[in-house]
Amino acid sequence: MDAPRTLIDLLLRRSEGNPDGTAYLLVERSGPDGATGTAERTGTTEPTEQTGTTGPAGTGDVRARSLSYGELDLAARALACWLLDRRMAGQRVLILLDDAGLFAKALFGCLYAGAVPTPCPAPNGRRSADERVLSIVKDALVSVVLTDRESAPSVSRLLSAAGRTGLPCLALDDIELPPGEQWRRPDLDPDALAVLQYTSGSTRDPRGARLTHRNLLANQGELVELLGTGPHARVGGWLPLHHDMGLSGLLLHPLWLGTTGVIMPTADFARRPARWLHTISSYGVTVSGGPDIAYELCTRKTTDEQLAGLDLSGWQVAVNGSEPVRAETMAAFAERFGPVGFRPDAFVPAYGLAESTLLTAGRRACVRQAPQPHRVDAAALEHGEFAPEVPGRPVRTLVGCGAPVTPDNDMRIVDPDSGRVLPEDRVGEIWTRGASVADGYWKRPLESRSTFGQTTADGETGFLRTGDLGVLHRGELFVTGRLRDMVVVAGRNLHPQDIEHRIQQLSGLFGATAVFGAEPGRNRVVVVQEVRVGRRYDLDLAALAREIRACVARDFEVRATHVQLVRPGTIRRTSSGKIQRAAMRQLFLAGRLPALTTVSGTPVR
């Protein structure tokens, strides 16, 4: 059978071949910190409600609604007719939906109409989330906003306050859509724009990567090669669907395989990480994943009572897909959950970015061997060399993220200034090219020219500059940091995540840490550290700040010119959990960080 040319072809193939087959199980919880979902009104048959189960202590009672391929197809046709009646073909449609069932219907409804779905995290009351929504509305020239009845009032108020009173805002679960019989399949080319996937904005304002149908479908084939998935796999998890990992890995991959995806609310994981593990255990999930911090949270926050009710022996592929991938995180997770069946060889470290749809490189699941950390000389790494550890000298532990999955995914390590391709064991910028790489950013020609279609010094062309730093060692990629986040002190290239990780080991009261250089070309290193304060803790905050300065000076031989202790939640993160160091730098320089205490000193000259 020929491969589908567009995402529309893919869903039509599933709905025509197996209309009653379950596309998604939509997991809901009631009980502690949980809330059950509400019925949807989308002009189609209601999803079937399945019998619930009781989770381990503190995870609540669980039930799942099923959404079939046929139901998804009918809902997409109905929404497409509504959009086409309003001449939305080719227009950008903002999707602000947390409910996975509604999100899937909105996404394919836009595609069926020839409109361009533009996923975005729903506003959560924080200023940064509101700013992201308004930024994308402006950048993408959005024509319609799709949300739900719970969020519609706050979204409408946000748009009105920003002067967008004329922008239609549709509550997808609170409207009777027209019947979809009049829908006619649009004639789309595989290279037509399918989705505007906005970047997480970890180093700058979010930009819309232009993903075509060809990009998205090519990446699905690459996921099969990496994960070894087939029709008997069951993909599941909590990843937000507006993010590239959630969209391509959690929503689209089950559809590509013709199997069932198991999707739980992201907020459920945020409240109690053990719910992710319970979903895997209860619904037979074989493939799941998330960023490194997700595994760390599970290890730290899963209680013995919750552990006792788990069976993770069926979890065959555990993707760790966000830099930095930490060896100690995976070792601690394997030790904690080994007694309930988790196997260390299930870990699949991987590397990717929105500009490459999702996947760029990864360690193949078929290897069936636990990832082995590499200990390298820290001083050599600061000078761009991947060298073995030297006894008595500081080391850095790195985890390999495999190699490009298919021959089409071509990768080089390049000197970012000269464009010269570097040999193995030399650190440089990661450049990649292949069928899953986007064709540019939406309405940003200058940034597109400087990022996409780049040519190396020896004439190889068509590469994406990722902005990430890495090294190839024996054909395997090791990601070392981000080019824009690098802190340069006295000619040394310091990776902020290393300093952050060491600082967090100083106290159990420490939360997120952000380390950055205050000004380009100046030897000013700033540390912003979240710390839990309250009546239960008798803290000498100034002493804690001085301890941080002493740690940085002792372990990294640099002086932190400013250490600010702040309340939990102050440090900005992307939707995938990455520290937004550029945003933190801006807040610091503008004097907008509400500090509990600050210790400062003379900059290093």
Image (cartoon, rainbow, N blue to C red):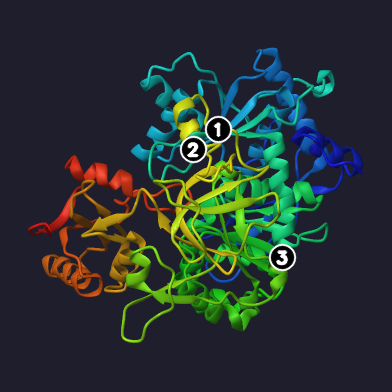
Q: Is residue 447 left or right of residue 235?
A: left
Q: Going 27% across and 74% down the picture, which residue do you hit?
A: 506
Residue under label 1, please give it. Answer: 440
Q: Amino acid at mark 3?
A: Thr
Callout 2 amino acid: Thr
In the rendering, at what x and y percent does residue 124 appear? Answer: 43, 41
**Quick check: 499 above or below 322?**
below
- Which amino acid, mark 1? Gly
Q: Residues within 10 Å of mark 2 (few under 14, many from 20)?
A: some
In this picture, residue 399 sits left or right of residue 392: right
The quadrant holding residue 118 is top right
Can I make out residue 242 in this image? no
First-in-chain label (1 vs 2):
1
Q: Is residue 330 visible?
A: yes
Q: Which residue is mark 2?
A: 451
Say which quarter of the image contains residue 62: bottom right
Q: CA distance from mark 3 to mark 2?
A: 36 Å
Q: Is residue 7 above or below residue 323?
A: above
Q: Is residue 66 above or below residue 137?
A: below
The residue at 65%/79% (across/down) is 341
394 up-or-down from 498: above or below: below
Q: Nearer the viewer, residue 331 or 352?
A: 352
First-in-chain label (3 vs 1): 3
Which of label 3 and label 2 is nearer to you?
A: 2
Residue at 46 percent of width and 29 percent of height: 136
Residue 286 is marked as: 3
Q: Which residue is more in the foreground, 111 or 276? A: 111
- Which is more N-terminal, label 2 or label 3? 3
Which residue occupies the extreme left position in the image? Answer: 602
Q: Are marks 1 and 2 in contact (CB under 8 Å)?
A: yes
Counting every numbered tag in the picture gives 3
